[in-house]
Image: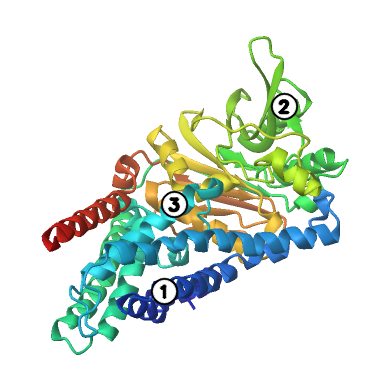
Amino acid sequence: MFSVPFIFPELHILAFFSGVPFFIVLFDGLAGGKKNKALRYTFVFGMSFYLPVYIWFLWMYPMEQTGVTPLQSAAIVTAAWFGFPLLQTAAMLVMPLGLKIFGRGYAQNNNINNIFYLPALTAALYVILEWVQSWFFTGLTWAKLSVSQYKNLFFIQSVSVFGTYFTSFLIIFINAALAVYIINRPRNNSRLLIFAAVLLYFANSYFGYFRLMYYSNAPEEKKITAQIIQGNISSYDKWEESGVERSLEIYASLMGSHRDENIDICVFPETAIPGSMRKNGGLYAELSRLAEENGVSLFAGVIYSEEAGENGENINRYNAIAAFDKNHDFIRPYGKRHLVPFGEYLPIENILTKIFPFVANISLFDSALTQGEGSNIMTVNGVNYGGLVCFDSIFPELARQSVRDGAEILIIATNDSWFRDSPAIHQHNAQAALRAVENNRYVVRAANTGISSFISPVGEILMQSDILRREVLVSEVGIVKSKTLYTICGDIILYLSWAYIIFCVYIKIKTKKIKY
């Protein structure tokens, strides 16, 4: 049940109580000194949560565009579907271990001594495990609890203050508080837990209500008109020999048939044109021509190549967003900062290719891509644009860095055609909505086969495309200069969670000294 809101986001309320049975069993097991039992229950809970969330891996079969056989594809997809949940469940084991180490007075006559200590400790540990998952094995942030709440607009507004970890903290605290209440009902003061859980939920939503009201009545900011071209060319098709010519023809046709002198910028998806672009090269000339003919500033997803090294002996290749302004001048591209393992580079390549030779074929590119450095803000016609390419958008710190560096509008170019029409399509778009709220920025999100969308600074999806359809979207987006507390200070609740754990360590040491 805990994973249901990730697949059916309209049922976001389930996240606040569907974890209660697990926490009852976990707390009871730890109170009885059954550490191994608690670890087993956590493992079962973790796998039952993550397996449904990552079920979209099955939609990626048969991966024919990578050159692997159907049998190899089945092995890869199955390994990914079970492997990612296993990795994230392993990180989740931090929670029972932390509760065992730092928890105090779990039970006396089956009662919990301090009714708020345990829910707060549990929530703090969960925040830390989500943080660990964000850098473990290059970063696994797909299943952050905040993603389950992206349609709960009132509730997610607080991420503009504390970041997405705050949403996770509240969800886990409420679940744990309800569990402690059920375990500890004979004690009168345990009713305070119900009061605290309800108060936290509605206080957070109340803040969200007023933030939404403020923005609905705020003075109009300066706006531009943006266009998104969704060519609906799947990765399973576009990397064929004729891919570059066919893609250019489709995008040129869609731009031409929807030409409008009021449009300021046009955005293509990630690797919309599946060729390598060099400055002043053939693809460069074609994209510049498209911008000139249609009278727009163009942002196009391309593989951008440039010489590197003192004598230009090396070639760096970036998964990039290339920009041409209305004067058709080329703006230095934004390069993707968080590359996808196995898709854009092969981790521990020497070891993996010896054990599993066929994994060398998984990457679509004939050589590993180069990781982008920095936010590389693209200033076009006086407006500062921050770029994010696909996987970048699931890492809050990347969007935050872009806004801190001056981005007034966020542009996301992504290729979600790998997911076909699976739940991952909506989950990835949900991440973009959270980036908008965190940083108080409009988001223009262009996807090859959907979902393309315009998102407001409060996370409202103003317009979105259908999946697996060729579409053109046009909307006004505001130029926003103000920064949120989250943008300025970062993940405050993460810092507080670490401080609380340190406090728990201090209490543990102090208690031991008193005993001896």
Which quadrant of the structure image shows residue 272?
A: top right
Mark 1 — residue? Answer: 38
Between disc 2 and disc 1, the foreground one is 1
Counting from the top left corner in percent of width and height, residue 304 is at 68, 30
Amino acid type at mark 3: Val
* Dot placed on the residue nearer the N-terminal end, 2 or 3: 3
- Left or right side of 392 for 194: left
Quarter of the image with the C terminus in it? bottom left
Mark 2 — residue? Answer: 284
| Point 14% across, 86% down: residue | 188
The answer to whether residue 315 is above or below residue 15 is above
Which quadrant of the structure image shows residue 56?
A: bottom right
Amino acid type at mark 2: Tyr
* Dot placed on the residue nearer the N-terminal end, 2 or 1: 1
Mark 3 — residue? Answer: 132
Amino acid type at mark 1: Ala
- Left or right side of 456 for 346: right
Real-space Cα separation, disc 2 to disc 3, in angstroms: 41 Å
Q: Residues within 10 Å of mark 3 (few under 14, many from 20)?
A: some
